[in-house]
Image (spheres, rainbow, N blue to C red):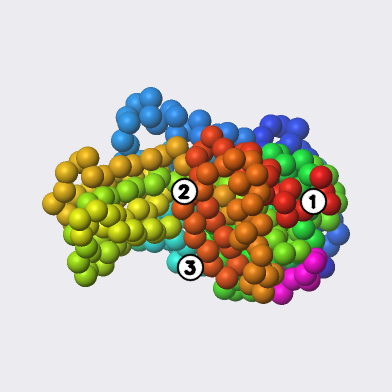
Amino acid sequence: MGLIVQKFGGSSVANAERVMNVAKIVTDTYREGNDVVVVVSAQGDTTDDLIDKAHEINDHPSKREMDMLLTSGEQISIALLSMAIEKLGCPAVSLLGWQAGFRTSSAYGSARIKSIKTDRLRAEVDRHNIVVVAGFQGINKYDDLTTLGRGGSDTSAVAIAAAMHADRCQIFTDVEGVFTADPRKIPEARKLKEITYDEMLELATLGAQVLNNRSVEMAKKYNVEIEVLSSLKRVPGTIVKEVAKMEKMLVRGVTKDTDVARISVTNIDNTPGIAFKLFSKLAQKNINVDIILQSVGRDGTKDITFTVAKDNAVDAIAAVHETFDIDDKNITCATNVAKISVVGAGMESHPGTASKMFEALYEHDINIDMISTSEIKISVLIDAQDADRAVAAVHKAFYPELN
Ligand code: ADP
Ligand code: ASP
Ligand code: MG
């Protein structure tokens, strides 16, 4: 018995039948004697559909109005789920993000949670209500609605678990847990029993959609143990925590990220301070740079290639123009690229990991464009059209026993 936070993603509440299924899970937990706070996302593809609707009207809507629109998706879900819970005979109350006390930064579209004033949540729990909270949203200092960025409901759930010192935080989704690769693409992928925050953070950042990376960051900061599990099949999922049992695995997972643009700048002066000038300009514009490659060009010049998220490509090119007085022909931008990564704390002490990954790609005739490494991950940039083949090849190389 205790306080349990349960989060259900879009596919788990996609239609009436799924909403009733979620209500059953929630009321079972409540009837076992627990206090329950539920966080839900918008139904199915609602958020994508709302974005399309906005673009039918205006190609560049303001971020404030976009947030006003997108928060409505979660509003539908909380009302429907509360009605479903009532139908199953339990008391429920739905709350929008601001009613649940979510105060955020003012950055519409990618707001950060600043604090949660838990008085209302506590009061509703004390009244023995099942509290159903709209994920992905809050309110900023101008009393405007904000959203936390795509996939942000995971972060809402972890934040509530941290603020209310919940005994458990369960993230229910449409797969059985965290796998060694996306189980929808790689049927041989294996479910992990446990994974550390650091490894999960890398997986989430490098493209494993199953948890939002900010939610993992927050779970690590406040030491919230997360359980990722299926809303459709009642079997044990994956536990995300500080120290995980090693399952004799060098690599915990293989990921693919296609939200990458590669920008190359050629023929710049080979003098000190060039990289500093460019990357400080990019930082000023709040653009995160991922992989960087600098090479010597011809006649005392140098070339710099770097990657950014696709959304930032136009601003990054503008930053290059603001930094250097160069011709358009010396700047190229490619968006048909993908980043494939392997992640695992074990690889630090195993020198063969990189060569194994590169060999698998070579055997499938897949060309590597750029490489970057850290203690617990290796990433390569390749052609987007090779991405799925690459994940399959690399996964097979690291988990031959599963094939
Ligand atoms: P929700 O709507 O519940 O938030 P998401 O679609 O955001 O669900 O995330 C779940 C999806 O993440 C799965 O359907 C799966 O295809 C994808 N996924 C990608 N990589 C992984 C992985 N390594 N393990 C599990 N699922 C993954
Ligand atoms: N509905 C939002 C999205 O689609 C938030 C979420 O699903 O977590 O991104
Ligand atoms: Mg999600």
* Amino acid identity at mark 2: Asp
Q: Nearer the viewer, residue 296 or 240?
A: 296
Local SS, label 1: helix
Judging by the rendered image, the residue that carries numbered circle 3 is 115
* Amino acid identity at mark 3: Ser
| Spatial CA span between label 3 and label 1 | 46 Å
Q: Does the magenta run of residues contain 162?
A: no
The secondary structure making up most of the magenta span is: loop
Left or right: residue 344 versus residue 188 is left
Residue 12 position by quadrant: top right
Judging by the rendered image, the residue that carries numbered circle 2 is 369
x, y percentage for residue 167?
A: 73, 69
Q: Does the magenta run of residues contain 245?
A: yes
Q: Earlier in the sequence, mark 2 or mark 3?
A: 3
Total marks in image: 3
User: Mark 2 near mark 1, Cβ–Cβ under 8 Å?
Assistant: no
Residue pictured at 32% horizontal, 31% vertical: 59
Q: Is residue 66 visible?
A: no
Local SS, label 3: strand
Q: Earlier in the sequence, mark 3 or mark 1?
A: 3
Judging by the rendered image, the residue that carries numbered circle 1 is 400
